Amino acid sequence: MSSFWEATKTRLQRAEELVGLEPEMVELLSKPMRVLEFQIPLRMDNGKVQIFTAYRVCHNDALGPTKDGTRITPDLTLDEVKALALIMTIKHAVVDIPAGGGKGGIAADAMKLSERELERLCRAYIRRLSPKGAWVDIPGADIGTSYKTQAWMLDEYEQIMGFHSPAAINDKPAIVGGSLGGEEATGRGLFYIALAVSKSKALIPQSCRVVIQGFGTVGSNVAKLLSNEGFKIIAVGDIRGAISDSSGLDIPALVNQVEQTGSIIDSPGARAISNQELLETDCEILIPAAVENVINEENASRVKAEIIIEGANGPLTPSADKLLSDKGITIIPDIVANSGGIIVCQFERTQGLYDMYWDIDTIHERLKTRILKAYKETVNTASEMGISLREAAWVNALRKVGQAIRMRGWV
């Protein structure tokens, strides 16, 4: 069993104790309501057939249809998908989205597939998944998927159904029924949270040093927005390594370099460091925006940040979380901090159902209002109960999910 799934269940159990949920509800929430695992035989460009394992997990739909997340990664496991689906249930509840948690994916290396192979794989996933549409379960994008893959998935779904249904698939291009602002939504949400928490700490942007692990869509967008606001981005990292510059990195130039070369490595004027050194860099704000469990019991004691804003899902293990909290480090949990993407996904579904689309200023304003409301509610609950921000966010979510379950008569 994966440590990520175990860590997620540990956080659920702690929140359940704080809320005082009924034993039947604890049992209900500890397992997904639906789990699908299936095989995809795919004809490769060379004529050979390769078999890929795929998953879709729907954790709980008491608040509404399950939705989001389809990742394509080589080492994807069912436990990982189960943990992510549970997190999505909690995350939707935290930010008042009437939806449950869904997650899925394919165990494959998208980087080793040709574009034609990737398209065939995505279309085959939808055919074998048989999603039930905008009112039941809505797949979205995640690691290894993109606007392009989601457009293919939507087209395959609509070809199967025989009618247009833009709300059936999330994270697609605006031209086929997606929402403006979707690609930058998670990074923009992190930006709004960073502004709010730095203000609460009386930090001045120009003297606030920021370290970002992960420089993909999320990391690069939050870096651009913070840099434009005057924050000093002193170190960033990607899958190939990390770089630092105590005087502040040139983020626009770095973004351009990544577009040209695919990596931040060998950036002129920057010092090469390891991703481990990156996490241990002295700074005011650390944003881990890559993968789970990067800060753990082995390196947590060396983390020097004053504030950690979780851009990835589960970047801190429970033991690291406790150690850092005990040190007085403020941790803004993933289910609040990186919820910008799912908030705009909800906007996307709403616009698709109504066939009425919003301008970018409306998207930004509504995103800011929604995510800061969740942040303030989390801070208030933490203060009232004397618990951590992470525990407070889970408590707020479980109160809403629990109420929906009771009203439905499930327990």
Image: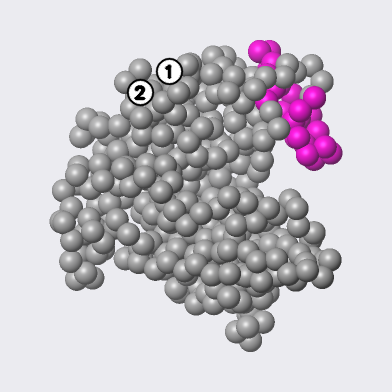
Q: Inspect this view and state whether residue 62 appears.
A: yes
Residue 226: x, y in percent? 61, 30
Q: On screen, 198 above or below 316? A: above
Task: Give the image's coloring scheme.
Answer: one colour
Label 2: which residue?
323
Q: Which mark is residue 64?
A: none
Looking at the image, how many numbered discs can be counted on the residues? Answer: 2
Q: Is residue 27 left or right of residue 40?
A: left
Question: Of residues 189 and 108, which is closer to you in this image?
Answer: 108
Q: What range of the chain is rendered magenta?
A: 242-266
Q: Are marks 2 and 1 in contact (CB under 8 Å)?
A: yes
Q: Residues within 10 Å of mark 2 (few under 14, many from 20)?
A: some
Label 1: which residue?
301
Residue 174: x, y in percent? 68, 62
Say which label, 2 or 1, has the lower sequence index: 1
Q: Is residue 266 left or right of residue 38?
A: right
